[in-house]
Image (cartoon, grey):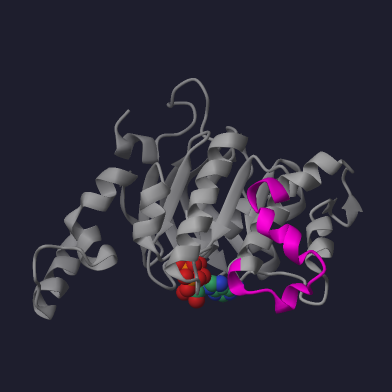
């Protein structure tokens, strides 16, 4: 199957197993009239890391929120098209339902409970829908397997932890849920390059060792494409480009606008023409 077929195929058309998650021609509105996303078809195959790239306001978070069901709490709604999870239609399902199916969403902005200690934050990972969903020390230990640094700050109030430590904490807390699909919104935001590299390398380890499918929405195109299997680029609520990550990273538009590594030196008018042309091709 070609990349574009893969991006637009329905579960019935694809190979034996349906993708873990698939959006088929999805339109998303907030408050019943604000159109945030339109005509988006994308898929995350089992075990893949998928990069979702694009500038501010492109619609990346909206897509993640409608997959995890959190978008409904913000009066978001899939008004056209369908969202499938394991081949089953889960369009507009609520967050509780999706969490119980193994979808964990790490929101933008490192949402820790600032007044709780790091350990207490981790223990919150043992709860789901207000109830402790199981108690197994092994589940808790997975946090330290990938982020042993957290052991040194267990008694620190999470609000006093550094940005990097907080990012590790929210990923570790999500792992305790043993997700099947992990959605990460801007995990690199505001972190030093070395820290981003360490955290992204750990995400790859988690993906391989725990077989967790991931969709990473991030503005750091270089780092994200570097660890991804497949990538989508959004602009103005639509998918503008999609390809295997290594192919996408080599595309001139990506080098020009996202990686800053193009060999071509462009004047502003050239760039503008290029952008306009890009929209229509
Ligand atoms: P960023 O990286 O800045 O978060 P993004 O690509 O994730 O950008 P979204 O946050 O999904 O983009 O926003 C897409 C559009 O939807 C924007 O125009 C935004 O203003 C709008 N939007 C996002 N959340 C809401 C909401 N809760 N209610 C109404 N409009 C919203």
Reply above or below: 229 against 172: above
- Which of 126/267 is in front? 126
The percent coordinates of residue 101 (x first, y second) are 71, 40
Residue 157 part of the magenta segment: yes
Residue drawn at the location 80% of the way across and 47% of the way down? 140
Quarter-of-image position of residue 53? bottom left
Instruction: Give the magenta range.
Output: 144-164
The percent coordinates of residue 87 (x first, y second) are 57, 32
Q: Is residue 108 visible?
A: yes
- Which of 65/196 is in front? 196
Residue drawn at the location 72% of the way across and 55% of the way down? 173
Residue drawn at the location 44% of the way across and 72% of the way down? 57
- Which of 161/100 is in front? 161
Quarter-of-image position of residue 21? top right
The percent coordinates of residue 196 (x first, y second) are 48, 62
Q: Is residue 78 visible?
A: no
The percent coordinates of residue 30 (x first, y second) are 57, 69
């Amino acid at each position: 199957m070609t990349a574009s077929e893969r991006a637009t195929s329905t579960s019935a058309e694809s190979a034996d197993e349906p993708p873990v998650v698939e959006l088929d021609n999805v339109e998303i509105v907030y408050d019943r009239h604000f159109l945030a996303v339109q005509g988006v078809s994308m898929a995350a195959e089992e075990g893949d890391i998928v990069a979702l790239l694009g500038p501010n306001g492109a619609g990346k978070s909206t897509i993640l929120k409608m997959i995890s069901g959190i978008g409904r709490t913000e009066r978001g709604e899939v008004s056209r098209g369908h969202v499938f999870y394991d081949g089953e239609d889960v369009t507009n399902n609520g967050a509780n339902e999706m969490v119980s199916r193994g979808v964990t969403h790490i929101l933008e902005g490192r949402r820790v409970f600032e007044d709780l200690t790091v350990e207490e934050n981790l223990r919150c990972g043992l709860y789901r829908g207000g109830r402790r969903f199981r108690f197994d020390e092994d589940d808790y230990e997975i946090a330290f397997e990938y982020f042993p640094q957290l052991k040194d700050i267990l008694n620190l109030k999470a609000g006093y932890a550094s940005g990097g430590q907080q990012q590790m904490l929210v990923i570790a807390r999500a792992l305790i849920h043993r997700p099947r699909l992990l959605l990460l919104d801007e995990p690199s935001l505001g972190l030093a390059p070395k820290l981003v590299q360490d955290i992204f390398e750990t995400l790859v380890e988690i993906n391989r060792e725990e077989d967790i499918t991931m969709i990473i929405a991030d503005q750091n195109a270089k780092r994200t494409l570097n660890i991804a299997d497949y990538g989508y680029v959004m602009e103005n609520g639509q998918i503008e480009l999609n390809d295997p990550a290594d192919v996408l990273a080599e595309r001139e538009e990506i080098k020009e606008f996202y990686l800053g590594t193009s060999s071509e030196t462009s004047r502003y008018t050239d760039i503008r023409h290029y952008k306009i042309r890009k929209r229509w091709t």
